[in-house]
Image: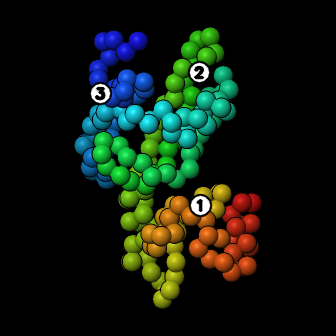
Amino acid sequence: DAQGIDKRYTSSDGKTFAMIYFDQTTGKSGGIETIQTPNNFGNLKIIEQVEKNAKYGDKDSLFVGPPTKLNYDGKDFLGINFGMPIFNNKGKLIGVAGYTLDFSEVSETILDPKLDFFEGDLRFLMTDKGVIAIHKNHNAILKTLSDINKDPSVELVNNAVKE
């Protein structure tokens, strides 16, 4: 029952409760604001991952979701979600404490032209599943290396990443 709960912490359809804080001035102090819980917030892969895999008593697991296109408070961005389960004293999963990392500043740092040491060098961030999260070619983002490069030698890189 959402009666008496601040409307900022529930989705507009009333189905999801979450306290979401968004840093409007990333890289500077201050700027953290409360935002309205999106209707699809309960459908995030990180929530599903925690619900499926969390074990009562495990205080050390941090669940990491895949790079995802997100929209918080009407702002689209590419980010990654982290989550930890919250259990009640009877061992029932009652929620998830989470954090979303917006890749914009990480991307600026990784792709900074000052880091170009030789012509044609390439820096990118790829997950353990081979999904590209940061790349100077925006068409490569959220694709695998095999999707954008059909050369057989790509399998060597994919295998090295997965090890």
Q: Name the kind of residue labelled 2 in the image.
A: Leu
Q: Name the kind of residue labelled 3 in the image.
A: Arg
Q: Quadrant of residue 93?
A: top right
- The residue to which callout 3 is attached is 8
Q: 81 left or right of 18?
A: right
Tally the numbered discs: 3
Q: Position of residue 39 (x, y in %)?
A: 40, 34
In this rendering, the answer to whether 141 lies above or below 83 is below
- The residue to which callout 2 is attached is 93
Q: 59 left or right of 1?
A: right
Q: 36 left or right of 18?
A: left
Which one is earlier in the sequence, the residue at label 1 or at label 2?
2
Residue at horizontal 61 percent and vertical 30 percent from the top: 51
Residue at horizontal 74 percent and vertical 66 percent from the top: 159
Task: Give the structural element (helix, strand or loop) at label 3.
Answer: helix
In this rendering, the answer to whether 36 lies above or below 126 is above
Q: Work out how far the residue at label 1 is from the one at label 3, CA to CA, in angstroms.
A: 33 Å
